[in-house]
Amino acid sequence: MDKPESGGTAPVMQDLKEGATYAWCSCGRSENQPWCNGAHRGTQFAPHVFGAKKDGKAALCACKKTKNPPYCDGSHVGG
């Protein structure tokens, strides 16, 4: 597996808490999108661990094509 699988075709809206740490799924295999559940084991992928900079809703990438992980950048629109 050299490219991630798509975990969805639209961003997943999530409430983030400032200062909290999250593990975003980068492989697309997690059944708990957009969060990592360890399904990447045995691949070259690892979760993208990040800290929320502010409280509020965030559009997190599910298609795994974003150039700004973990945030959606609209890459799912182009196919």
Image: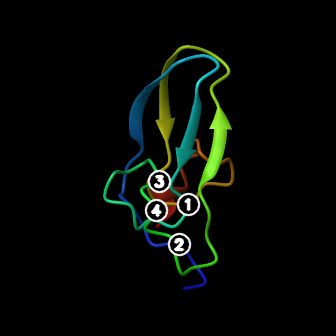
Give how far apart the Cα atoms at labels 3 and 4 are.
Answer: 6 Å
Residue at numbered disc 1: 26
Closer to the eye: label 1 or 3: 3
Q: Earlier in the sequence, mark 4 or mark 1?
A: 1
In percent of the image, x 50 and y 48: which residue is there?
61
Whether residue 72 can be seen here: no
Residue at numbered disc 3: 36
Give how far apart the Cα atoms at labels 3 and 2 are.
Answer: 13 Å
Mark 3 burial class by Cα count in 10 Å: few <14, some 14-19, many 20+: many
Mark 1 burial class by Cα count in 10 Å: few <14, some 14-19, many 20+: many
43 or 1: which is nearer to us?
43
Closer to the eye: label 4 or 1: 4
Q: Earlier in the sequence, mark 3 or mark 2?
A: 2
Q: For the residue labelled by badge 3, is the local secondary structure a helix, a strand or a loop?
A: loop
Residue 2 at x, y percent in the picture: 61, 84
Determine the image quadrant of residue 21.
top right
Q: For the residue labelled by badge 2, is the local secondary structure a helix, a strand or a loop?
A: loop
Q: Three-letter amino acid code at disc 2?
A: Pro
Whether residue 37 can be seen here: yes
Contact, mark 1 vs mark 3 (Cβ under 8 Å): yes
Residue at numbered disc 2: 4
Residue at numbered disc 4: 38
Q: Three-letter amino acid code at disc 4?
A: Gly
In percent of the image, x 53 and y 48: which residue is there?
24
Contact, mark 2 vs mark 1 (Cβ under 8 Å): yes
42 or 72: which is nearer to us?
42
Determine the image quadrant of residue 49.
top right
Q: For the residue labelled by badge 4, is the local secondary structure a helix, a strand or a loop?
A: loop
Contact, mark 4 vs mark 2 (Cβ under 8 Å): no
